[in-house]
Image (spheres, coloured by chain):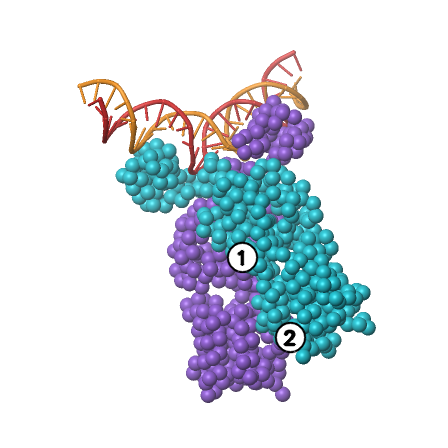
Chain colours: A purple, B cyan, C orange, D red
Amino acid sequence: MAKKEGAKGEITINDIAKELNIATSTVSRALNDSNKISDATKKKVQAVAQEMGYELNLVASSLSKNKTNIIGVIVPSINSQFFSKALSAIQKEAKLAGYNVIISQTNESFEQEVEVLKVMNSARVDGLIVSLSIETKSISHFNALVKKKVPIAMFDRVNYDVPGAKVVVDNYEASYKATEHLAKIGCKRIAHLAGPLGCKVFDERADGFKDALKNSNLDLYPQFLLSCDLSDKDAREALQIWMTQSERPDGIVVSNASAGLVLTGAVKSYGISIPDNLSIISLGNERCNELMVPSLSAIDMPGEEMGKTVTKKLLKQIDSKTIDDSIVVKPFRLLIRNSTFKKA
Amino acid sequence: MAKKEGAKGEITINDIAKELNIATSTVSRALNDSNKISDATKKKVQAVAQEMGYELNLVASSLSKNKTNIIGVIVPSINSQFFSKALSAIQKEAKLAGYNVIISQTNESFEQEVEVLKVMNSARVDGLIVSLSIETKSISHFNALVKKKVPIAMFDRVNYDVPGAKVVVDNYEASYKATEHLAKIGCKRIAHLAGPLGCKVFDERADGFKDALKNSNLDLYPQFLLSCDLSDKDAREALQIWMTQSERPDGIVVSNASAGLVLTGAVKSYGISIPDNLSIISLGNERCNELMVPSLSAIDMPGEEMGKTVTKKLLKQIDSKTIDDSIVVKPFRLLIRNSTFKKA
DNA sequence: ATATATAATGCAACCGCTTGCATTAATCAA
DNA sequence: TTGATTAATGCAAGCGGTTGCATTATATAT
């Protein structure tokens, strides 16, 4: 077979057309299984394509169809268990529908989020799945995309002012339940390690905490509500503050999984026993939670579920060319483990 | 400003050209900061581009430049700590060089790997970073890419028959050191939970284990070398076998992090104390290793480092248009924790 | 002032595929 | 048999940039 190839050795539909002495358009239609091409021709074309090692050039295809079949995904980080589970589900779901996925992380930086959004725009993604950075307050950086009607779906860290579907958990309720759980097992002095102020998910968690205290007739002790960036360092410092107070907490609700693990580990150095002297529960559950000793109670946030659903929502928006402003609230699970064992 | 926009509301360089009454090529060159365009024109063009909200269409650009500035990344899974760290580093490094990243996971399936490779080919990625699936034995699915001289770089799960740079750790040595460590602290009956047979990294680890035993003058007891898929279930089953034998192991080298954590957790139910009756060390280290009780000794595989290096290697191949067949062996660290505490 | 090098811009083909419309071939009803 | 349908294929204009080469404007040398 005489192969006339382009510069980079790529076989194009033109090559196939020449080989068969038919029009390029016929080849294109044959390969796309158009119903206006005879079966005989299709067979021939497919055979030759196969033989010549033809592979569709998605770039060219995207350009002429004005559709890339690429979904852009923007997350704060890709190496937290929650997000990597979500990403995994997103990728899986997207692939099922014939979409590729471009992933970018913002590292919790607003500036990077803005930049990444531009790149996604330039890449002409067919739709966008976003989980906002902690720093993100305003959303004007979405304007360009919104104006162009690029479908957007958000999960977990969402902003309801951006049009498109949202998939979340009820953070208020999650925190409320966690706090209530501590109250129920007898904790009287419950503290909360909160995330950065102004970040909605963490604000909601702090609110849930406060209301649960109130409804359980428990006081909020001074300094028992500490807000920080949830880094290992900050978590340890918060613990230090609590442990050197005259009235130590006997229960802690930690606003994310990572800090929860750190706290639980760090508590040991104060000669305190969990759960006898102190109960801990984290909002967010990682594999480690059940493996460590004591195993760490948690609210499990359904990462895969959220990833899967947000992808489906986005794909629906893409297909239907409509904006779906629905909000899906995924259920969380309260996982009671040894760190919050019922006191006698 | 009169905006004449295309169907999807996209501003093109043609729009800018018309607006300014100059040629499209001039606009293109101006935006690309070509040195054959006067500063005055550049300023004007950039101003108008800004004002009209122009954003480069990467799809069109890619097509005409025959370069996508996209790196394809193929990994077995994106939600293991090792790979998510690597991915994070890859993404970061790629972005620094102006590349986007398309990520796909094979879920350890050869079939999916083959398929994903085709998609990457169609997407015309400028280069490929790959970590092979466990199932992958043959590499003929890389032929098409190799023939087209698409740069490929592999890390961790590599195959030296595919041209391109490789970034690995010395798995043999890692396993050897881990085993030797157990021997040194006095373990006499050391077992090894190996990964699937035929997967190089795990074979090498098994070899390192065996050689370390030999050189430490220790016997390999029957059934003490068990190969499995390293799932939670398999790990527990292996432990079951060992624990119901007359001669239980007093040391275990587990061939990945996840199974190591599971084993350590499961051991408790046999009423065995770590490290007094049994020492455990895992090849691969997760955050959990140091948080659990007892903290789990491990060989730390440098995920970020590998991700960073493999990306740099790939970018160099892309830039230089040459194949770099170098092999970088990244150092691992032996992290001695409480699960392998020196016996009296 | 004239030839000549240099800088700035324009023209048009091209990247590989898609698609509306035109054309030709095959099929059917009258 | 002939005009009307229907089926199959071809033509050519995009999609939105990029780039080699031609052209024009400007600067330098003689």
Compared with A45, B227 (above or below) is below
Amino acid on which the number 2 mark rests in the picture = Phe
* Rendering coords of residue B284 (x, y %): 62, 63
Label 1 residue SS: helix
Amino acid on which the number 1 mark rests in the picture = Glu
Residue lying at the far right in this picture: please name it. B246
Rendered residue at 77%/66% (across/down): B219
Identify which residue, A116 or A132, lies in the foreground.
A116
Residue A175: in sight, yes or no? Answer: no
Indicate left or right for B195 with B35 as reference.
right
Identify which residue, B158 or A34, lies in the foreground.
B158
Q: Which mark is residue B341?
A: 2
The answer to whether the residue labelled 1 contacts the one labelled 2, judged by CB atoms less than 8 Å apart, is: no
Identify which residue, A151 or A259, lies in the foreground.
A259
Q: Which mark is residue B305?
A: 1
Indicate left or right for B234 with B306 as reference.
right
Residue B31: in sight, yes or no? Answer: yes
Which quarter shows the N terminus of chain B?
A: top left
Identify which residue, A111 or B169, lies in the foreground.
B169
Compared with B316, B273 (above or below) is below
What distance separates the C-alpha of mark 1 from that of mark 2?
A: 28 Å
Which quarter shows the C terminus of chain B?
A: bottom right
* Rendering coords of residue B259 (x, y %): 67, 65
* Rendering coords of residue A201 (x, y %): 48, 67
Compared with A25, A78 (above or below) is below
- Single out the mark in the foreground, 1 or 2: 2
- Figure quadrant of residue A80: bottom right
Which badge, 1 or 2, is on the more N-terminal residue? 1
Compared with C25, B102 (above or below) is below
Rendered residue at 44%/72% (across/down): A228
* Rendering coords of residue B139 (x, y %): 67, 44
